[in-house]
Each structure stands twice: as C-alpha cells, then as structure tokens.
Amino acid sequence: MPVFAADHKSTPAYLDTAANAHGDEKALLMARSVDRVAADRPHVVEIGPGGGAAVTALASLLRERGRSADLTLIEVPDVESRGLAHAIERFSAVGTCRLLRGHAQDIGRLVERPADVVSASALLHEVYSYGGGYAGIHSLMRDLPTILAPGGFFAYRDVYAVRAPSLHERVTHVYDAPSWLRFLRLFTPLYLSDGTHPYHHAQDEVVVRQDSVIVPVARLQASTCAVVRAPVGLLREVQRHYITFRDHAWRSGALGFVPVLEGRPSADWLDARSGHKRVHYTVTAADWLPRSQRAMLMAVSEPYGDRYAVDGDIFDACTDIALAAFLTAVERGDAECGMVWNDWAAREGRETYAYLTLDELITAVAVHSAEASGERRTVLLPARADDIIVRHRHYYSRYLRKRLANPLADAKQLVLFSHIDVADSEILGEALAAVRGTCGKQNLARVYTALNPGG
Ligand SMILES: C[S@@+](CC[C@H](N)C(=O)[O-])C[C@H]1O[C@@H](n2cnc3c(N)ncnc32)[C@H](O)[C@@H]1O
C-alpha cells in the first residue's frame, strides 16, 4: 500500500491552493444538513479539512442564516495548512472550532460528543488509498452511526466514478494523442504495481493493441494509435490522473507557462455551459523545451496586463504538446522533469480516485452502517432523491471530449446520507424510494437484506 506523503500534502501550493477551490460545493451538504437538523447549535465534524475551503464556506453560510455551530475538524498528524489555520480563526465569528489530530479510521475514539453532521469531502479516496482499501472505508462506514446523533447526517463528496454497473466492466478505448500515449505508458504500470486498487482479478487485465498486435502497456509506442481493453474504472483513473498531473506540471512552472487557476481570471468564460473559457497565463524561465513551443503559444495570445490571455482550447492543445515533450524528458532521465514527476507520483499518483460508483457507494454505506453496533438499529441512506448530486466539470469535460475518442465524464459525486432509525418505516420507505433511481435492483436487494438481518 502506498505511504501517505504528509510532507508533500502539506506544501502550501497543494492543500492551500491547488486542492482548495470550490468551497461552496464542499460545504453545500453541510449547510443543507444544518438546515434540517433539530439542534439549534449543531455539532459538525469535518474529516480531512485540507486547506479549510469548506470551513470558510460553512462560516459564511451560517452567518447568512444567523446560525451558529460547534465544528470539530479531524486531520492527519503532521499535515499542516496555513489556509486552514486562518479558516479556523475566522470560524470563531459563528461558533467554536477545534482541530483534532488523528485518522478517520479512529473516528469512534476521537469524537466524544455525538455529531449532528459528519462531512467528508475528497476524503474517502484517501482512506481507500492509504488506509486499508475497501476494508478501511467499510470500517469507517460502520463507525459513522456510532458517532452520529439520531436524525444526523453524513455529507459525502468525492470524485465521480463512472456511469456503469461496475468499475470492472470491460470497455475498449482508443488513444492517439502523443501526450496521452506517453502518460499511459508511464503511469499505468506505476499505478498497477504501487497503487492501492481493485484491479487484480483475471478479468481486469489491461490489453493494449497497436497495429493489431498485443503490446505490454509499459512498452507501447507513443507514435502509434493504441486500442486499450481494460476495466472502465482503470481507464477512469488514467483520465483523472492525467488531469491532476497536467495541473501539477503547470503549477511547477516546468512547462514554461503557468495558467492562473484560482480567482476571477480562472473563470473568464466564453461559454460556461460548454466549458469554453479564455485562459490567463504567465511565462516562466524553464528552458528545456524548444523555444518554438512557447513562441507558438505567445503568437496566438493577447497581452493582458502582466500576463497573457488565450482561447482555452488553444491553451490545452499547446499544453499537450509541451506535456508530450515533458514526459519524453522524464523517460530519458532528465533530472528536473523527473523531480516534478516524482513529486506528483509521491503525493497523489498512486491514489485511487474512483473506488465505488454512486450505486455501489450508496449500497455500501447502507449495508455497512446497518451493521454498526448501537442501542437502536439505524442505517445511513439518502432520504430524498435530490440528496444525490453529480456536479459536472465542464472545462475538463470539454478538453477530454476534444482529446479522447472515448472520454468519461469528469465530475464530483455528492450524497447526503440521513441517519435513519430502522424502526421508522415511513422515513425508511421514503429513503428506499429516493435511491431507486440510482441503485440497481441487485443492490436494492442487498440493502433490503441488510435492513432485515433476522429474515
Ligand atoms: C484531497 S484533500 C481534501 C481536502 C478538503 N476536504 C477538500 O475537499 O478540499 C484530503 C484531506 O483528507 C486528509 N486525510 C487523508 N487521509 C485521512 C485520514 N485517514 N484521516 C483523516 N484525514 C485524512 C488529508 O490530509 C487532506 O486534508
């Protein structure tokens, strides 16, 4: 199992900046829960607060509502964030906020006062990746009801998996872009050998064909179209990791240009619904790329104050050309590029982002929470159909559609689980109706069986 790289995670450029956007979305289900709990001053627990985006957003949502709350944060020992420290300070205007050091896996021991709301944004994929795979997340699902007050909520948000019955469904995808072919060749063997992932079954083998001949993924030709037959979940990982690596390479400055990825310039939309925007960027001193590449980008850009602005589609195309050269340099042993690659690989390159589809997630949380030991038998299920949300990332999806023959949707999945007393047949009936549109019949039957263990 890969090691959780606390030092790489703590670099200010990561938790405080790169992983700290979309605060309103991260706090959305917390705020929705606060509106629905009976307690006047709810106890909210956030596991893995990162750079504090949700803490800040929750504080302003509470202020707007004239509400207050007691917030407990649980963060891994040694992970530090200046952004979080500021967010904690500012939260005092709407309640109390304390930071506990520990792991989600020990939540039963860490949280002393029953929680009205437990929130976990982009946390479960880390528990899966570093904290015991499925056993780790199932154990957390069993612990949640033990710390949740009756009528409380579990607010979940993470990377959207796929729209398929299973991550193991075999699909055939075609890749012809040189940067993607190089990434497939470098990343896939690393992930399969060093990552925590579920692709160990005979049916999960990755089969790559080039010119109709099967070639090992580590030796595929970057100049020839590749036809890849593999589990859809694995190809989802490739896609997701490409996007996070691209972001990391930009921010490192190694590509020779750095887009503005936060604040107003990062949302200069030409058409937000189709994900089309202008990208604002600055140039860096990186000099290993052929000068012509940067010159080409600047030739199609407009000066904009101390930076440049260019159509996002053109920027993405130039990025892929630079990334292909960058990955070639990594494979050649270039020290500077190798360091950038290794930093990313240590920090997040071995993680599994898509561990459960929405159907499987809702089923797993329901089945395992129903196994929790407690005085009353309870279960965690979404109580309303609109407590299950998919938020699409239009800019990324636009890029993926342009570059890949078989793009998978880039999005976040959010589910608000209610802590329901199994004896409350009315609410339970509503919850089972709410998940019918998302969960398949086999999984509904598993939930029903878990709710009726005595037969
Ligand atoms: C990808 S970041 C997400 C941060 C924040 N929740 C957000 O959505 O922006 C994951 C966070 O969970 C923390 N984390 C990872 N594994 C954890 C664990 N086992 N227990 C508690 N926190 C953990 C990380 O240190 C980091 O703060």
Image: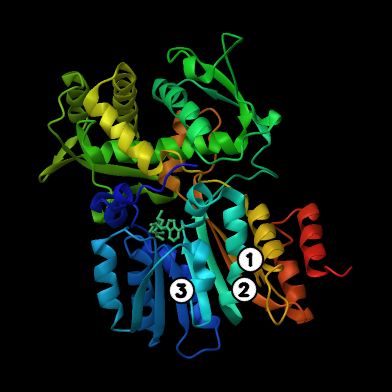
Q: Which residue is mark 3?
A: 45
Position above or below: 412 against 3:
below
**Disc 1, disc 2: CB below 8 Å?**
yes
Residue at 50% over, 51% down: 125
Q: What is the distance, in whole Å, between disc 1 and disc 3 at their CAs?
A: 16 Å
Rendered residue at 69%/64% (across/down): 366
Instruction: State yes or no: Cβ of the residue under disc 3 lies below 8 Å from any atom of ligand 1.
Output: no
| Ligand 1 position by quadrant | bottom left
Hey, which quadrant is residue 416 in on the image?
bottom right
Furthest-right residue in view? 455
Instruction: Check disc 1 and report the residue beneath it.
Output: 142
Q: Which one is in front, 64 or 159?
A: 159
Q: Amino acid at mark 3?
A: Val
* Nearest to N terminus: mark 1 or mark 3: 3
> Which image quadrant: the C terminus?
bottom right
Q: Measured from the top left, where is residue 9 in percent x and y? A: 33, 50
Task: Residue 282: give x, y in percent of width and height.
Answer: 17, 40
Q: Is residue 18 left or right of residue 44?
A: left
What residue does disc 2 label?
145
Label 2 CB-ligand 1 distance < 8 A: no
Q: Position of residue 220 (x, y in %)?
A: 49, 15
Up-down relation of residue 394 to residue 286 (above or below) = below
Residues under labels 1 and 2: Cα distance? 7 Å
Q: CA distance from mark 3 to mark 2?
A: 13 Å
